[in-house]
Amino acid sequence: MRNTLWFLFILTSIVLSSCRMNPSIMLRTDKDFVFDIPSDTLPSEYTLNVNDRFSFRLFSKDGFQIIDITSFSGGTVSGYNFAQTFQYTIEPDSTTKLPIIGKQKVAGKTIRQIERFLEEKYAAYYNDPFVMVNVVNRRVFVFTGQDGKGEVITLSNENTTLIEGLALAGGISEDGKSHKIKLIRGYNTDDAKVFQFDLSTIDGIHSAGMILQANDIIYVEPQVRVARDVLREVTPIVSLITSTIVVIAAFDRLSAR
C-alpha cells in the first residue's frame, strides 16, 4: 500500500510539472521584446493592400446619371444595372487587372486615391468619368482576452479605429488586460509590425484612434489566473488518484480476509 502511494505521488508530481498554466495565451513576447512605435506617417485612412478585393462603378459625365431621376428605368440608370458589379483582387505584385486599361498598381492607395487614379485612366475612353470604389473583404481578427476566444470582424466603415474594432467584438473581457493590447499588422508578410497599446487610462485615447487595416490582429492579453488554472489542471488528477486509492484500499481489505 505504501509503495503504491509513493508511486501515485511521483506520478502526480510528473504530471503537474508538465502542465502549463494559461495554455490559451497566444502571441507571447519576451520581456525585452521591442514593439514598433506608431509614427506620424501611418495612414489616417484605410489603404488597400495585397489580397484585398474591391469593386467599382464607372459613370460618364461626372456621375450626372446617378442623380438624374429622369434616367431611372426598372432598376437601371440609362441602361446601367446597379446590381451588376464585379470584384477585383490585388495580386502579390500590388496590381490588379481591370477592364480596358489592363493591369494597374493600386496597392498602397486609399479609396479616394484609387477613385481619382481610375478616373484619370478612364478619361481616355469616357467623358468626365466618375468612379465609386467599394472594398468588399475588409476584416480584422479580434481576441478579447477570454479563454483564447477570437472573432472575425468585418469592417463596414471605411476608417474603423482600434477602439471601434474592440467595441464591435464586445469590448475587452473581464479577464483581459486593458494595458496590454497588441496590434499585429501584416502577419502574413515579411515586414510584420507589432504594436502594443495601453488603454487602461485616458492617456491611451490617442492610440485608440489608430485606423485598422485589413487582416490586422487585435490581441488583448488575458490575466494570469494562477489559482483557477491550477485547480482546473489538478481536479481531474486528484479525482483519478482518489478513485485509484479507493480501489486499492478495497482490494487490500479483500486480501486481508
Image (spheres, rainbow, N blue to C red):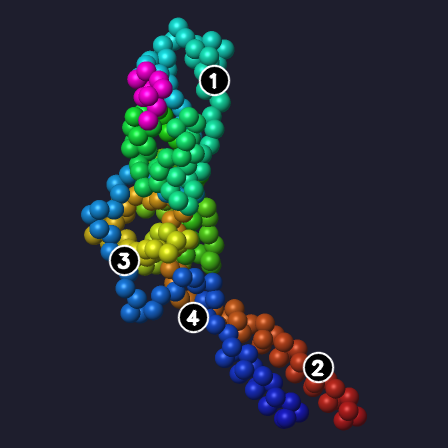
Q: Could you tell me the amino acid type at mark 1?
A: Asn
Identify the residue shown where x is 47% and y is 68%: 229
For label 2, the SS is helix
The first of marks 1 and 3 along the sequence is 3
Residue 126 place in picture, x, y as percent:
35, 17
The first of marks 4 and 3 along the sequence is 3
- Alpha-carbon neighbours of circle 2 within 10 Å: few (<14), some, or many (≥20)? few
Region rendered in magenta: 121-129
The first of marks 4 and 2 along the sequence is 4
| Mark-to-mark CA distance, 1 and 2 | 77 Å
Query: In this view, which residue lies farthest toward the top?
Result: 70
| Mark-to-mark CA distance, 4 and 3 | 30 Å
Which tag is nearer the camera, tag 4 or tag 1? 1
For label 3, the SS is loop
Residue on which the image places disc 1 = 81
The first of marks 4 and 1 along the sequence is 1
| Mark-to-mark CA distance, 1 and 3 | 46 Å
Residue on which the image places disc 3 = 36
> In the drawing, what numbered circle is on residue 247?
2
Q: Is residue 24 above or below residue 76?
A: below
